[in-house]
Image (cartoon, rainbow, N blue to C red):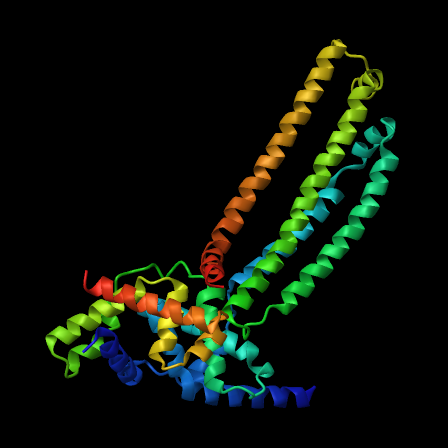
Amino acid sequence: MDELDLLKKDWKKQDDSFQKLSYDEIYKMIHKKSSTIVKWIFIICILEFLFWGFVNLLIPDSYFEIYEKLHLKTLLNISYIIHYIVVVGFIYLFYKNYNAICVIDSTSLLMKKIIRTRKTVNYYVYYNIIVTIILSIIINFMMFSDTDLLVEVFNPKHLALADDKLFNILLIAQIIGFVVMIGFLLLYYRIIYGILLKKLNKNFKELEILE
Amino acid sequence: MNETKIVTKDLEHKFISEFQENQNIIHKVCRIYTNNQEAHNDLFQEITIQLWKAYPKFRGDSKLSTWMYRIGLNTAITLYRKSKRSVITQDFDSVLHRIQSSDYDNTEEEQLKLMYKAIHQLSDIDKALIFLYLEDKNYKEISETIGISEVNARVKMNRIKTRLRTILNP
């Protein structure tokens, strides 16, 4: 007999070999908390939304004084208004996609929906990074284009420090800060989503080949 | 408020009774996707929770068993995250304990052991296909559950069968 037929025959015989659960055991089970990939993605995404929100709130007022002196306040205010409109849009899309996830869909469709939900938040993160980069470039450009004003703002007491030295220190500090931030973000996403989505991505790719 | 509570209790009772009767479907999903008792129980619990969460939306336009196959496989393939406790072990004997006492001869027993071992080496998607095949599902149902075309399900299934045979007869 072919091995597969043998397996099929054995497969049908196994019904009595399971430890059957009683009514009470099932009752207890359905009141336990689930821990699925979707749930984790949801939690992490909410934390990401909150994180980027808090980053903006955490910036102390004194920071804005510097920008005011550098004549950048209006630019920043406008960018904040646009930013919050975009964030609300992202949160709406995220909820729409998350609610569409349905366990009764076919496996392939379910995976697509989960990946779409995740992508929405990925775009949100890309958006934040890109906006940060663009704003940094604009601000730095404006700051460093007016050296006298820059020295005035960052060295108001005219400490014994050569102006070009101050200029270099500020520039290097900005670049290091920038590189560290991008590096940290890349590492974070590699770790969090690398672990969380590894299995899902692998299975999704396998199904994609079949379609 | 009180009325909703009663409705929920009724639904809960209905679910548990129906689930209890059909629980073998989920045990079988767990048998394909896990290879020790602890992992089996873990996955079983997660699938049960998912079934209960989806139950209020179950309209009865499909068979309860079909609905359970879908949620069971979706949970195993897509949603489930292995807990730290269930490290992969080579505990195949627990899968085969029933064979010892039955009327198989040694060669058949050996072949089955190898067969289950081979199945555990398959990918998650392949496991789903072979599971539905063992459950005597037709290609239409298989393709609808997984979400691929019938032709592709057929092609894929033939490939899995060939693969299993080569694993067994190298």
- Relative height, residue B17 to residue A43 (above, below): below
- Relative height, residue B6 to residue B117 (above, below): below
Quadrant the N terminus of chain A occupies: bottom left
Q: Quadrant of residue B42?
A: bottom left
- Relative height, residue A76 to residue A122 (above, below): above
Residue B46 lies, in percent from the top left, at 46, 71
Q: Is residue B71 left or right of residue B9?
A: left
Residue depicted at x 80% and y 33%? A62
Q: Quadrant of residue B123?
A: bottom left
| Residue sticking out furthest to the left | B106
Residue depicted at x 49% and y 49%? A194
Residue depicted at x 32% and y 59%? B88
Visible residue check, residue B40 = no
Visible residue check, residue A71 = yes
Residue B45 lies, in percent from the top left, at 44, 73
B113 and A192: which is toward the camera: B113
Q: Is residue A170 left or right of residue B67?
A: right
B54 and A46: which is toward the camera: B54
Residue B126 lies, in percent from the top left, at 38, 66
Residue B154 lies, in percent from the top left, at 39, 72
